[in-house]
Structure formats: C-alpha cells, structure tokens
Image: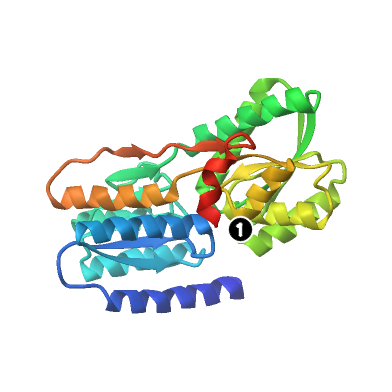
Amino acid sequence: MRLSNYLAGCAAAAALTLSLGSVSALADTFALVTINQQALFFNQINEGAETAAKAAGAKLVIFNANNVPSAQNDAIENYITQKVDGIILIAIDVNGVKPAITAAKKAGIPVIAIDAQIPDGDNVSFVGVDNLKAGEDIGKFYADYVKSKLNGTAKIGVVGALNSYIQNQRLDGFKKAVAASGLKVTFLDTVDGQNVQDVALSAAENLMTANPDMTTLYATGEPALLGTVSAVTSQGRTDGVKVFGWDLTKQAIEGIDQGWVTGVIQQDPAGEGKAAVEALTKLKKGEKIEPIINVPVTIVTKENVDKFRGMFK
C-alpha cells in the first residue's frame, strides 16, 4: 500500500471515530459515506443531504473516506454497529463495497447509493444519473462539434479516474457515441487523475506534453476537469485545445466564456443528496420508494451558462 493511501486510511479512521461519537441514540439518524471532501460536487451532495435532514428533523453524520475504498467498508460496518437508521453511500469501488451493503441489509439498515450504481447490490435504491447514457450524450455533443467546427477530424486525450466505476462508465459511453458518429477521431492516451485535482493537473500536463498535436480533451469528473483546465491554461494551449467534461467549476465557466471549454455535463449534486435523505425518511415511515431515482443533467455551453453562474459566486 502506498504511504499516501495508508495515511489517508488512518485519517479516515480517525474521522470515523469522531463522527460515530456524535451519532445520536434517537431515531432517524442517517449516515452519509462520501468519497472525499475536496471536490465541490461531493460537498454539494452533503449540503443537499444536510438541508433535507434538517427539514425532516433527522440527524445526519458524514464520513469522508479520503479516496480510500477500504475506509468506506470500515465506515459502513461501524455504522451498522452504531445502529444508524439508514446509510447513504457514494461508492469508490462499487464491487468491493457490496459485502458491507449486504451486511447492512441483514441488520435491517437500508442503504441508498448516490452517483455510483452498485451492480446487483443489496442497496434499496440508487439516486443519480445514468452515467453511461450521459457519457453518450456528451459524446454525441462532442461528435457534432468535431463535425461542424473541426472538419470531422480530431485527436483526443482523456483525463479520468481509473479507480472510479462511474467515471469509467462516462468514458465508455463517450467512446461509444464517438465511434457511432463515424468521424475520424483518434483517441490518444487516457491518464489517471485519481479524483485528486493536483494529480489530474500533472497527468493532464504530461498528456499534452506527450501529444503536441492533440486538439481536444475529455475530463470525466470535477477534479479531472479542474486539473485539465489548469493544465491547458498553464501550457498556453487555449487556442489549440478544446475541452469537454463533467461538473462545472468557476474555472470551467471562465473557459466557457473564453470559448475553449466547449461543453460540460452538469449534474444536480445537492438535489441528489436531498433525494436520498427524503427516500430514507419515507422508508422510516413505512412508505415505498423507487429502486432508481433519476436526477436530470444538463450540458452547459456558452448559450446556457448564465443559468449556473450563481452557484460559484
């Protein structure tokens, strides 16, 4: 195990101990197990969940796994011991976390997955987007752009998070749509940003240095997009490289205004957190919930970006 992951795991364990100490013995205590608290996306999920919990008179505790998959398993197991009333999970390793979800189900604790679907998992519901389909949507948007603005030819690099199931889905859907377009698009390297902005920045810089003829970039998540935007700017490639990706930030909006960030998938993370808490609240009341609760996405471009500026003031 790398020292950074070991230290992150230790920090996660310490954070869990603190959060568990605050779990109330009263009813309606929900736990949210997240990936990290660096990305704005995850923090917005937290905010939506906290707002919904307050409105429902429930207590919400949040565990930050610091990008360590095993820490999520440990957190769920400890929350089972604490007998929380429900768990909300943003999974890193959707297969590796399945035994912990099954253990929660056996203990009578419902688990709702946000953002990352758990294949054949024992979670009661999934809240989020169809990442594969949304990847196809941005892939079609990209293909249309290449056809109309780049004479049907492009070379593309990808900044992803290779340990993230959902980000791999976003790439698979993107590639599927681009292949179906029949355009002459050459996929260059896919580099691993590890869902960490600084890592994504270095990876994107190395990718561009190795491919001076690259004309487009696709980033599969917020840290990847932040790193990509910073790399394109620092290397002075804003005139020659067009960027497509996921999850708006202030920097991405600046790139949209300048014309080199072309299209960004924007989810509704606060809405996802809110929907998950509301679903758990319904279950506590004996009501039924849907197994899939879809939250729509928008492709943000220069034409509609004004609607989203207020989120980043």
Q: Is residue 105 above or below residue 158?
A: below
Task: Kindly identify the residue that appears in the image at 26 percent across and 38 percent down.
Answer: 290
Q: Quadrant of residue 150?
A: top right
Task: Kindly identify the residue that appears in the image at 51 percent across and 47 percent down.
Answer: 165
Q: Closer to the camera, 145 or 251?
A: 251
Q: Residues within 10 Å of mark 1 (few under 14, many from 20)?
A: some
Res. 158 visible in picture: no
Q: Position of residue 283 (x, y in %)?
A: 18, 49
Task: Kindly identify the residue that appears in the image at 50 percent across and 67 percent down.
Answer: 66
Q: Position of residue 87 (x, y in %)?
A: 29, 58
Q: Is residue 114 left or right of residue 298?
A: left
Which residue is under mark 1? Answer: 194
For the C terminus, the image quarter is bottom right
Task: Kindly identify the residue that appears in the image at 49 percent across and 73 percent down.
Answer: 9
Look at label 1 and name its amino acid. Gln
- The residue lying furthest to the right in this view is 212
Q: Quadrant of residue 23?
A: bottom left
Q: Position of residue 284 (x, y in %)?
A: 15, 53
Q: Is residue 25 above or below residue 67?
A: below
Q: Is residue 11 above or below residue 112?
A: below
Element type where label 1 sits in the image: loop
